[in-house]
Image: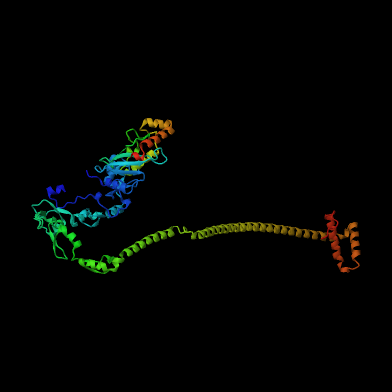
Amino acid sequence: MEDGRSSKPTSCCELDIRSLLYVSLNDNLVCPICCSAFVDPCYTKCGHTFCSVCLYRALAQAQKCPVDRGPLSDDDICPPPKILSNMVNELLVYCPNADKGCKSTIQRCLLRHHLQDKCRYTLLACPSDECTELIERRFVDQDPANCFHRPIMCPDCRDSVAEFELDDHKHTCTSRSTKCPDCSKEFSMADIRDHLDSCSESVVTCPASRLGCRWSGRREKLDSHTTECVLISLAPFLEKQEERIANLEVENKSLRAQIAVGGSSSMLDNDVFHIFTEHDRFRSELERLSEQLGELEIRQSVMLTNQTVRTKEEIQNMRNAVNAIRHQMHFLMMERRTWALQNLATSAVVPPGANAVVSASSASAGSGASGGSSNGREEVANVRFMRRDSEPYRQDVKL
Amino acid sequence: MALPKRIIKETERLVSDPVPGINAVPHEDNLRYFDVTVDGPSQSPYEGGVFKLELFLPEEYPMVAPKVRFLTKIYHPNIDKLGRICLDVLKTNWSPALQIRTILLSVQALLGAPNPDDPLANDVAQRWKEDERAAISTAREWTQTYAKQDDV
């Protein structure tokens, strides 16, 4: 601003981005070095982000990352993802002229434009050629040729005031008089405030208007109304009631909160709580048992399958064995038959012992049997003979 | 030179969101100079003591470390008679991403974990190594004598 006086700038907005006030700021967008939102951010190979200016200043002191202390050189720095630059550039900031009255909030990247071309509170060079002062844009817009630093005499106090300050001065000038809007009397600016509070002509409302009284009238008649207004006399009582209701509401709220949080704190809930825990215990027991049961069933079925398979195998084995035996028997029968037939063919040369037996048996059976069966009997006898021959120690074996 | 935004922000945060057991208040006439008190950490010989320190932010801060010094007498192998502190983050390991609050937390942690192998007060460190029990009891006595809250 000092420069402005000497060289008459067209505008004055040396912008310090780090001193801006943000509408809201995410902690992730804050540079760990300057503790402000990133300005022209850069990105390190170790994954940390800083303002470029901050990081290069830090690297000039020590060639390591300020966050993780890992080695870091200028070559390890690259521009950040575009999205990050966009996010910080679009952060909303309050206009730096907020203290002068500018209520704008602007995206950070548009702030310079706002200050240079829009903000009504930006200081510009005074339009007058002779004047070297600065003046806010709102005055220049009013009258682009006027010098607002020209001293003007205040019509009331006769002090000399710069033209652009006159409006503000009017509100504070103690010598200036003004009319009371109610009683039309003249008062100085210093006294008018006190007068407005006590002017007998001004229209006031009943003090009990909050409780529902609709009366309004001149202040001088207020006293008479006060004496007859029912609501005013009830006011202390009603206020006490209101206070009680407020207290009860607070209490109610806290009790509700207790119910919502604890639930089981009251004595009534004790039994219920007990039952619930018991219920839960049973349920878990049941779950455990059914689980065990399922397990057992599975085990049982596995065992059963194993058993069945084994039994089946055994049966198969036995069947095979039986078949083998049957074959063997069949073979033996065939053998014996051929043998018997051979025997029959050679019956002419029967040994004497054997002949005696055959004749004895045929004699004993000969009484009840017909002659046709004598051939079969002979065969039986032959079999018996053969048997005896193969197993001479087992006399009583019968087929 | 105007006070950097970062120092203003750090000061605001120290007041609005203070670290438990640590209190830092800037001087009215010099906002770079802080009066600090640090509570002795529990389960250390300094438990129950409240230690006064001074902290100064040099012109180059945060590119250089703040200057921190104990004002309260303390029996500690890494803190000498003048209250100077031997702590890596205050010297070689300073990083501009550290802040006043983190530095003071480190100082508080140093009280809880004395390191006699990297001494500043050689006599204290020697005693700490030879007879730790006696050294700890001296530290406790000094805490009682010099760092009670009433004196601060």
Q: A279 or B63: nearer the eye?
A: A279
Q: A375 or A277: nearer the eye?
A: A277
Q: What colour scheme does the image use?
A: rainbow
Q: How many marks?
A: 0
Instruction: Residue at 89%, 61% (x, y): give it.
Output: A358
Residue B99 visible in the snapshot: no
On-image quarter of the N terminus of chain B: top left
In the image: residue A216, left or right of residue A361:
left
Which residue is the extreme one toward the left?
A130
Q: B126 or A141: nearer the eye?
A: B126
Q: Measured along the vertical axis of the image, is residue A190 above or below residue B76? A: below
Q: A314 or B80: nearer the eye?
A: B80
x%, y% of residue B61?
27, 42
x%, y% of residue B130?
43, 30
Residue B23 visible in the snapshot: yes
On-image quarter of the C terminus of chain B: top left
x%, y% of residue A143?
11, 59
Q: Within the image, what quadrant is residue A63 found in?
A: top left
x%, y% of residue A47?
34, 47
In the image: residue A216, left or right of residue A143:
right
In the image: residue A72, left or right of residue A118:
right
Q: Within the image, what quadrant is residue B68 found in?
A: top left
